[in-house]
Amino acid sequence: MNKQKNTLWDEAVRHLKETLSQEIFDKWIAVIHCRSIKEDKAILVVGNDFYQSWLVENYIPLIKKALSIVSGRTFEIELMVDYNLVSDSPVEFVTKEKPRPFASPKRPKEVKTNLNKNYTFDSFVVGPANQFAHAAALASAQAPSRAYNPLFIYGEVGLGKTHLMQSIGDFILSKKTRKKVCYTTSEAFLNEYIEALQTNSLAKFRKKYRTVDALLIDDIHFLAGKDRLQEEFFHTFNAIFENHKQIVMTSDRPAGELSGLEARLVSRFEYGLVVELESPDMETRVAILRKKCDQLNLSIDPSLLFYIAERISSNIRRLEGALIRVASYISLTGQEMDRAKLEHLLRDTLDQEKKHSVSVDGIQKIVAEHFDIRVSDIVGPRRPKNIAWPRQVAMYLSRTMTNQSFPVIGEAFSRNHATIVHACQAVDKRQMEDLKLRQTISLLRQRIEHQAKKTQNDL
Ligand code: ADP
Ligand code: MG
């Protein structure tokens, strides 16, 4: 069975090798693994979503043809993703392979610290949505356990939590002070814990985690509902904390909102500093794309970067994924990219993004509700003081949470372009100085996003 599987697939591969250029073969065929071949079905596996969608779009018919040529039968192909095959995401593998962005995917040799060498403060672009988190992370890295302990970073997926957390590790290690830094995900922590239980090596496990200078533990929301694990982590936390060593955690939500997390852990997680990563604004998104282009040695027309940044706003990983897609299209086809092609190439991503799209109307409604005024007050001509501020907040949120331009937003508020610009600056400035306002804005954002998702689901 195995033999048949291998021979058939190997033969098809050999056939493809003969028919495709070396470059394309290496990039797109050599990365496929054959899991099984039955009568009329082949199950193939690749290491990330990007390969999957690219192959489905471009190479599945060729692969089918090759299989039928070497076997005399027709095959249905199922193409699956197994993240364990290569690295976690297309973007990550690409960024790890700097000089030859699309060469063979391999995990980097960083087993010792578990840190991804691309996740540093240098490569982290700072903007209004992440500057507090960034400043806190940097301070913790410069003075571990003395600045903020624990540091709790939360935010939605793809907004840079892991990147920022690992930057702290990288920074501490770069000082060559022989500090012991341990980065782990909560899931890996669980697996290690279970293994320790099974192999009677709990003492060793505990020693490993409780004697570090800095513990960076990612995706702590994973602990929710897992009582034994929480118990173990509670003691780990206490030991590190009492030794005056640094703890950094990330989560997709604030600790208090994680249902199934013991109160004693919640209160500990909130001992130190809690910071949020929010969706980056337009300028930051463009800056991130520029930085990525530099890192990958890509030259892409700035107007295209702008176009991508304008449309993908809720997830930086997705933003990078889109860039890689465009870059590989250009490198593979040698064709110029234009808007129509771009739109076609990114249609799946853009669809996903639309799902979360937030409307100016929706924002006005939620802001009005929060400040207990009417929407007609916000958009109307009146200028009493109690309305001016909510109105500015609504303008600011419209600018930062939708893809709309200043003039379009201006129209929605029956105001001109300059008024919106002014409102955004005013809110930005006040936010810098006012923690309470930051919290209010963050709460409003959550409500708006929540409402947008709900509306989508209802459609
Ligand atoms: P999370 O852990 O929040 O899901 P990641 O840290 O994995 O997100 O970030 C997703 C991707 O976006 C990574 O490739 C990361 O390098 C990139 N990224 C996130 N924030 C920034 C930023 N501010 N500057 C540059 N790259 C960023
Ligand atoms: Mg992460």
Image (cartoon, rainbow, N blue to C red):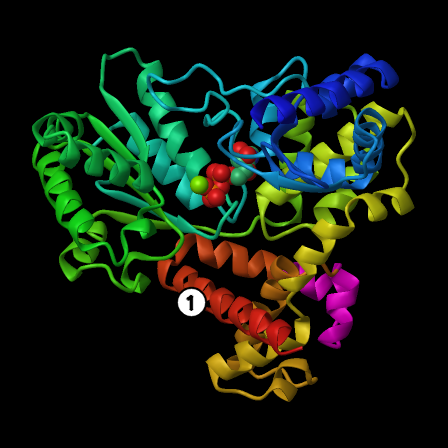
- Residue 105 appears left or right of 179: right
Q: Residue at the location (19% across, 25% down)?
A: 213
- Residue 54 appears left or right of 90: right
Q: Along the line of sight, which residue is nearer the eye, 229 or 306?
A: 229
Image location (x, y in percent) of residue 407: 79, 63
Q: Which amino acid type is marked by label 1?
A: Thr
Quadrant assignment for the N terminus: top right
Give the quarter of the image for residue 250. Answer: top left
Q: Is residue 140 above or below residue 223?
A: above
Classify mark 1: helix, strand or loop: helix
Q: How many marks?
A: 1
Quadrant assignment for the C terminus: bottom right
Image location (x, y in percent) of residue 46: 62, 32
Q: Along the line of sight, which residue is nearer the eye, 446 or 389?
A: 446
Residue 121 shown in magenta: no
Asked whether residue 348 is in view, the answer is: yes
- Residue 183 appears left or right of 427: left
Q: Residue at the location (50% across, 20% down)?
A: 107
Q: Quadrant of ligand 2?
A: top left
Image location (x, y in percent) of residue 362: 62, 76
Tell me the chief SS of the magenta region: helix
Q: Kindly identify which residue carries mark 1.
A: 440
Residue 418 shown in magenta: yes
Callout 1 crowding tier (Cα within 10 Å): few <14, some 14–19, many ≥20: few
Give the quarter of the image for residue 187. Answer: top left
Residues in magenta? 405-422
